[in-house]
Image: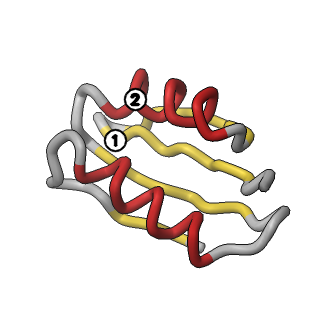
Amino acid sequence: MDVDARGLKCPLPIVRLTKAVKKSTKGDKIRIQADDRAFEPDVRAWCRKTGNALVSLSQEGGVVIAVIRKEN
């Protein structure tokens, strides 16, 4: 599943990610793009807090791309 959160400010990218994860099943991967500067530390903290896996985190042209795997 892809989530485009570009142009949204904190906390909306995490809100969109949370909604996507709730619609997913265990093992599904969600790819989210966000250009909010707070997104990178927020998504790391969100994964630690929720127990979901941060598969990858990269940056392309000011856009952070995170891939999360639903673990529960």
Name the kind of residue labelled 1 in the image: Val
Is label 2 in a helix, a strand or a loop? Answer: helix
Q: State how far apart marks 1 and 2 are (Cα).
A: 14 Å
Mark 1 vs mark 2, foreground winner is: 2
Q: Quadrant of residue 70?
A: bottom right
| Whole-percent x, y for residue 38 in the image | 27, 27
Residue beneath label 1, please? Answer: 63
Name the kind of residue labelled 2 in the image: Asp
| Whole-percent x, y for residue 34 in the image | 33, 47
The answer to whether residue 65 is above or below residue 2 is above
Q: Which mark is residue 46?
A: none
Dots 1, 2 in contact, CB < 8 A: no
| Quadrant of the frame with the N terminus | bottom right
Q: Which mark is residue 42?
A: 2
Residue found farthest to the bottom: 23
Q: Is residue 55 visible?
A: no
**N-term-proximal mark, 1 vs 2:** 2
Q: Is residue 56 visible?
A: yes
